[in-house]
Image (tube, helix red, strand yellow):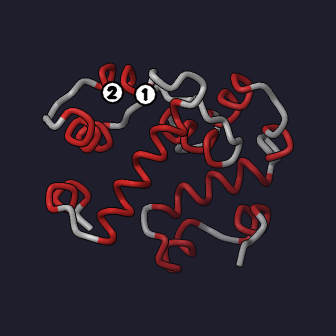
């Protein structure tokens, strides 16, 4: 069940959301709800714009940084090329997976995916999904240690 942002922003408090077991996420839910309820940002203002405009609007969302924008551009805007940021936890896993060693710099990982121009994020996503599907079917001990699931 989804609640409209207006109902959350105007009819709730952060404390009420915490009582619903949102924990530290309550602040983010409240801030995002306020942004959408006030029309400071809206899905309509994002869809159909060029990539740079979409990135700028998304970075205006509370709690959204460059890595989150890349995930959103891939998952919701279907942009397959946006890969500029490798978060540290992904870097550890990709370093091991791609180069069989710890500590490969993010730039080296980005160069690897640069072999797929226009599809860098798609290549990353396929590799990532394949790794986690394999882990789900047969435990990968080194990955288990990294993701602590």
- The answer to whether marks 1 and 2 mark residues whose Cβ atoms lie closer than 8 Å is yes
Please rate how many residues cluster around mark 1, counting C-alpha atoms within 10 Å: few if below 14, some from 14 to 19, many from 20: some
Q: Residue at coordinates 25% horizontally, 70% vertically from top-left?
A: 138
In this picture, residue 86 sits left or right of residue 18: left
Q: In the depicted view, which residue is nearer to us: 118 or 53?
A: 118
Secondary structure state at the residue bearing disc 1: helix
Please rate how many residues cluster around mark 2, counting C-alpha atoms within 10 Å: few if below 14, some from 14 to 19, many from 20: some
Rendered location of residue 17, percent (x, y): 56, 72
In this picture, residue 90 sits left or right of residue 2: left
The quarter of the picture where residue 107 lies is top left
Residue placed under numbered mark 2 in the picture: 109
Q: Quadrant of the C terminus?
A: bottom left
Labelled disc at residue 78 = none
Q: In the depicted view, which residue is nearer to us: 85 or 21?
A: 85
Q: Residue at coordinates 80% horizontally, 45% vertically from top-left?
A: 42
User: Spatial distance from mark 1 to mark 2, Cα to Cα?
Assistant: 7 Å
Secondary structure state at the residue bearing disc 2: helix
Q: Residue at coordinates 62% horizontally, 59% vertically from top-left?
A: 30
Residue placed under numbered mark 1 in the picture: 113
Q: Residue at coordinates 67% horizontally, 70% vertically from top-left?
A: 12
In this picture, residue 25 sits left or right of residue 4: left
State how many labels appear: 2
């Amino acid at each position: 069940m989804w609640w409209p942002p207006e109902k959350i922003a105007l009819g709730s408090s952060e404390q009420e959301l915490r009582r619903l077991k949102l924990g530290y996420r309550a602040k983010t839910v409240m801030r995002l709800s306020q942004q959408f309820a006030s029309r400071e940002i809206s899905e309509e203002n994002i869809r159909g714009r060029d990539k740079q405009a979409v990135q700028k609007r998304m970075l205006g969302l509370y709690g959204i940084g460059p890595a989150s924008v890349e995930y959103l551009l891939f998952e919701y805007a279907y942009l397959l090329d946006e890969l500029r940021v490798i978060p540290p936890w992904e870097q550890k896993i990709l370093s091991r997976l791609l180069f069989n060693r710890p500590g490969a710099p993010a730039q080296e990982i980005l160069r690897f995916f640069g072999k797929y121009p226009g599809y860098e994020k798609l290549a990353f996503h396929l590799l990532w999904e394949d790794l986690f599907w394999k882990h789900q079917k047969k435990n990968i001990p080194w990955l288990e240690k990294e993701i602590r699931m």
